[in-house]
Each structure stands twice: as C-alpha cells, then as structure tokens.
Image (cartoon, rainbow, N blue to C red):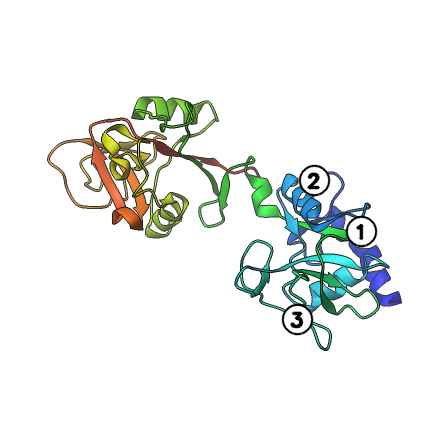
Amino acid sequence: MFFLRILLFISLFYFGKAIDCPNGTITDWNDHLCVYSGNQALPYTDVLTKCHSMRGDPIKITNMFENMWIHGFFNSTTYLGVERNSNQVWTYSDGSSLTYQNWAPGEPNLNLSNNCTVMDTSTSKWMAADCLTPRFYICSINMDQLKCPYGWVYNNQTEYCYYLHNFTYPDGVHWELYNVTMAELMCQKMDAHLVSIHSDSENDFVMELVKSQVHGLFNVAPGNYTCGYSYAYIGYYGNATIGAGMWTDGSPADYVQNGMLGDFYNGQIANDGSCSLRGWGWTPGAPRARFVCKKPSKD
C-alpha cells in the first residue's frame, strides 16, 4: 500500500502537470486519461450522471497497471465502471467488452440484484455488488474528447471534430428539414462547415456517425418517405468525379463515391440497414432531416 500511495503522489504532482486536464482532475498513470476522484459517496446511477456531466464514464480499468493505480485512491469500497447487462454479461459501463478482469475468488457472484462492480481496497480485487448503496467513485475522461466541443466526436486520424445534427421534432411529430444552404449556415454558426471527406477511413467514420434505423416510422417525413429524408447532407457539390466540384470548406475534391454524374449535385450520406442504404446519394438540394459538420480540433 505504501508503494501505491507513493505512485499516487507522483501522479498528482508530476504526471498531473504534463497535460492539460480540466480543473479538479488529474492525469492517470500513463497520461492517457483525465481522472476525477469523487469526494462524496453516491449511488451508482448518480455516479453515472456525475461522470457523464464531465464527458466521462465511471473508471474503465483495462490492465493491471491501471488497477494498481486506482487501488491507491481510496480506503473504502469504490464503484468501478463495470456492469452486468440485460443479457447477464459483464461489460464496461459504455457497453464495450471487458479487456481486463480482476475478480475476487467466487466473483462475480450469482446474486442477480448485484449488477454493479466495486473494488475491495484491501486486495484490489473486484466484487459484484448492489447499485443502490452510496459509494465513492472515480470518473475517467478520454482526453481526445476534450479536443472537441460537447456533442462533437473526435477522429484521431484526421484530428478533426465531427457533429451530426440528428433528427429533431420541433412539433413533437415531424422531422425538421433543412436544405443544403441552411445546413451549411448552421455549421458555420458553430465555426464549422458541412463535412468534407478525403479517404475511405474518414468515410467509414462518418458512415458510422450517421447510422440510423428509420424504416417503419410513420408521419415523420413528407409522404412517409422516411428513408429518403434520412440522408445527411455533406459538403460536396459536384458530379462525383475526382478533381471536379468542391467542398464547402474549400478543401480539394480528392475523394468521391458512387461514380460519375452528368450534372452537378449536392452530396448526402446514409447508413441505414432498415432502408438498405449505405453510401453517398445525390440531390439537387432537396430538404433533408440531418447534416454533418466538421471543424479542426483544439490543440
């Protein structure tokens, strides 16, 4: 335990100064995450709310070094970001599969009311526990996400931030629709432009961002044409030929999808299995329910 306290001390006064974490947080042992140590015991649902409000999650331990480092924080049982889901499978709180486990003997126990995970501070082992008891906790914040405003997603390959303006229901029933000019202006109000795409990997990233499942929704789109209106505007205007056309952010037209067109059209993108849509589409500027913005990340 003495070694772990020394490790924590070093992390607070050395590693914590190496990067720019938000106020009230420190960097973890390898400068990958910003970490917030809650000083008030809370039930697990309140822990989730607190961590999410900081754009983080309950601590996600992925190896034994992180487990040792977290072990040095508290002298009482602590919530971890590990949950039993509805399929009775233990996952991280963000739904991803466990890449590291440190269960105590006989754990996780079979009590179906114990759907949360705590660390035994005397052993650093994990135990299944109820989610209602107030306990101390730690939030982890991926520093990549701090490079973008709240609601935007960081791409570490392009080092840009992306924002999906998703379906909205201003009257509680129908999707709000935007033409391409409106969409670009709304991106510009956020110091961005409609997204430009310059590689297969960036295209896959945007495709994942716009994934939807709208077939079967009624009265949300004109003529119940939900699949057509579910496309999201991108910033391309051209005839789907490399070097022809333009992106609204002024970047070169060095990447296109879905072949040459006779005339110039606005680009749109969809990824909806229920509609059998995956890829780019073309429109003369008809209203659509969504659009994607892109802007440089913070240094």
Closer to viewer: mark 3 or mark 1: 3
**Residue indicated by mark 1:** 12
Residues marked 3 and 2 touching at CB (< 8 Å): no
Task: Identify the residue at image location x=56%, y=36%.
Answer: 150
Q: Amino acid at mark 2?
A: Pro
Query: Measured from the top left, where is residue 84 in percent x and y?
Result: 60, 62
Callout 1 amino acid: Leu
Mark found first going from the N terminus, 1 or 2: 1
Please state which of residues 222 and 140 is positioned toward the viewer in this rendering: 222
Tell which tag, 3 or 2, sits nearer the viewer.
Answer: 3
- Drawn side of residue 57 relative to residue 151, left or right: right
Q: Amino acid at mark 3?
A: Leu
Give the structural element (helix, strand or loop) at label 3.
loop
Residue sitting nearer the eye, 261 or 54: 54
What separation in Å lies between label 1 and label 2 (alpha carbons)? Answer: 14 Å
Q: Secondary structure at mark 1?
A: helix
Q: Which tag, 3 or 1, sits closer to the chain's start?
A: 1
Residue at figure coordinates x 30%, y 51% from the top left: 273
On screen, residue 215 versus residue 75, left or right, reads left
Residue 278 appears in view: no
Q: Residues within 10 Å of mark 1 (few under 14, many from 20)?
A: some
Which residue in the protein does label 3 denote? 110
The residue beneath circle 2 is 22
Q: Percent x, y for residue 148? A: 54, 38
Q: Earlier in the sequence, mark 3 or mark 2?
A: 2
Quadrant for residue 64, please give it. bottom right
